[in-house]
């Protein structure tokens, strides 16, 4: 089955998205990093202008939920005062740049991501969800994350690679960003109006030969909850953060800054782990093995509540679980061993697949799922 059409754009700060609980305002931190003052300020704004809930997204952004249309302009002014809107609205919408979150100052990821951000104005017109990954650590770590053009580590240097291609083009630190922009121009010039993502495009239109010559290194493991050389890593169940709890953690840890990741994890810089916290502190916590979208009533596309059921299933099976409020699969647009899809107030079961694939059982209630999870 084909995946149902999702929104053709992602919410931003200037262009929020209406959801079931109000406007969703997405904040894109530069280098996936908030200073201490910015992070505390963001928590305050989420409580002042929103519901006090924030989402960690799969693109390492933070969303403030339940903002009223009347408060949107005041929120923008406050975000700008925190330095969280560093560019004009057109460039803010283009700033879909995912970085490996364990970068250190002066390394290749840091240098190239900042250079790419400085050259956003040179990009051609691209679809709203089109994005870049700068992943130049010891080995790539962002392969499972959404990006269309990737700057990665290869055995003998760096490559620029089109998403979906096995091989990329060899580049240097001096040429990587220019080549990434050149690949974006090839995409813009050669695609048709309906094509929005690189992976689909190259499945139908062969890349020029020079873009398929070198392989990236095998992937390394992403961050996990617990102590880290840069500080401490915490998990947010289902990517949901209560702003007051995050503010308490920032103050109690004494961290210098906060980094966000695409894996429902965040890192407190230069701070030892805090054990008494509402957040996940162990890499083996079963809550990190379950994906669940906001569900009803927060999302107008969903007909079922998702996260309470997901929390009740944590630890009940070693298999990966995805609870999706509808068949679009926004929380996990890839296969899970157990996928439960909301439909007309009940759930359908997909095994080893995505929410838009054919279910093997239909019409399951939350109680039936809880009672039978061992069978699944």
Image (cartoon, rainbow, N blue to C red):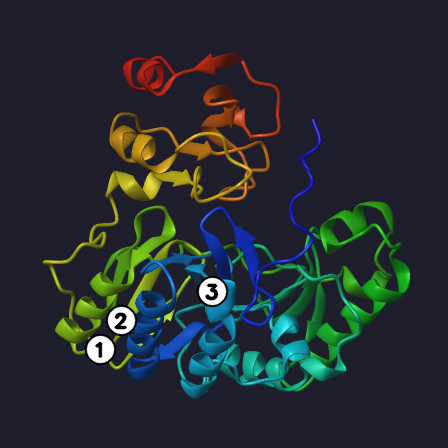
- Residue beneath label 2, please? 268
Q: Residue at x 73, y 54 (%)?
A: 197
Q: Secondary structure at mark 3?
A: loop
Residue 255, labelled with which disc?
A: 1
Q: Earlier in the sequence, mark 3 or mark 1?
A: 3
Q: Residue at x 82, y 63 (%)?
A: 187
Foreground: disc 3 or disc 1:
3
Circle 2 crowding by C-alpha within 10 Å: few under 14, some 14–19, many from 20:
many
Quarter of the C terminus within the rendering? top left
Can the viewer see residue 169 in this picture? yes
Q: Earlier in the sequence, mark 2 or mark 1?
A: 1
- Residue 46 lies left or right of residue 277; in this view the side is right
Can the viewer see residue 228 in this picture? no
Q: Secondary structure at mark 1?
A: loop
Distance Cα–Cα, label 3 vs label 1: 19 Å
Front residue of 179 and 88:
88
- Residue 115 lies left or right of residue 192; in this view the side is left
């Amino acid at each position: 089955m084909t995946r149902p059409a999702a929104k053709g754009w992602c919410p931003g700060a200037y262009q929020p998205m209406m959801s079931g609980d109000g406007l969703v305002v997405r904040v894109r931190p530069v280098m996936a990093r908030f200073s201490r003052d910015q992070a505390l300020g963001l928590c305050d704004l989420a409580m002042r202008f929103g519901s006090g809930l924030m989402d960690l997204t799969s693109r390492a952004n933070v969303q403030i939920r339940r903002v009223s249309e009347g408060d949107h302009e005041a929120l923008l002014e406050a975000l700008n005062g925190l330095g969280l809107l560093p560019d004009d609205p057109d460039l803010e919408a283009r700033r879909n740049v995912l970085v490996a979150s364990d970068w250190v100052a002066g390394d290749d990821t840091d240098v190239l991501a900042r250079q790419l951000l400085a050259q956003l104005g040179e990009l051609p017109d691209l679809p709203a969800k089109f994005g870049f990954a700068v992943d130049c650590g010891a080995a790539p770590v962002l392969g499972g994350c959404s990006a269309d053009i990737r700057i990665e580590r290869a055995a003998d240097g760096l490559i620029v690679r089109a998403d979906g291609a096995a091989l990329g083009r060899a580049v240097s630190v001096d040429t990587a960003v220019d080549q990434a922009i050149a690949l974006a121009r090839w995409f813009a010039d050669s695609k048709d109006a309906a094509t929005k993502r690189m992976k689909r495009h190259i499945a139908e239109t062969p890349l020029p030969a020079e873009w398929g010559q070198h392989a990236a290194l095998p992937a390394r493991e992403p961050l996990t909850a617990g102590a880290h050389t840069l500080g401490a890593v915490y998990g947010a169940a289902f990517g949901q953060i209560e702003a007051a709890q995050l503010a308490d953690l920032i103050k109690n840890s004494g961290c210098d800054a906060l980094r966000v990741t695409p894996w429902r994890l965040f890192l407190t810089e230069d701070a030892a782990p805090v054990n008494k916290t509402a957040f996940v502190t162990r890499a083996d916590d079963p809550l990190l093995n379950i994906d669940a979208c906001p569900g009803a009533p927060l999302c107008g596309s969903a007909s079922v509540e998702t996260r309470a059921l997901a929390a009740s299933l944590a630890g009940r099976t070693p298999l990966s679980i995805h609870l999706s409020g509808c068949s679009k699969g926004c929380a996990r647009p890839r296969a899970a061993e157990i996928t439960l899809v909301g439909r007309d107030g009940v759930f359908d079961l997909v095994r080893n697949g995505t929410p838009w694939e054919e279910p093997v059982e239909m019409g399951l209630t939350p109680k039936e799922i809880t009672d039978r999870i061992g069978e699944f």
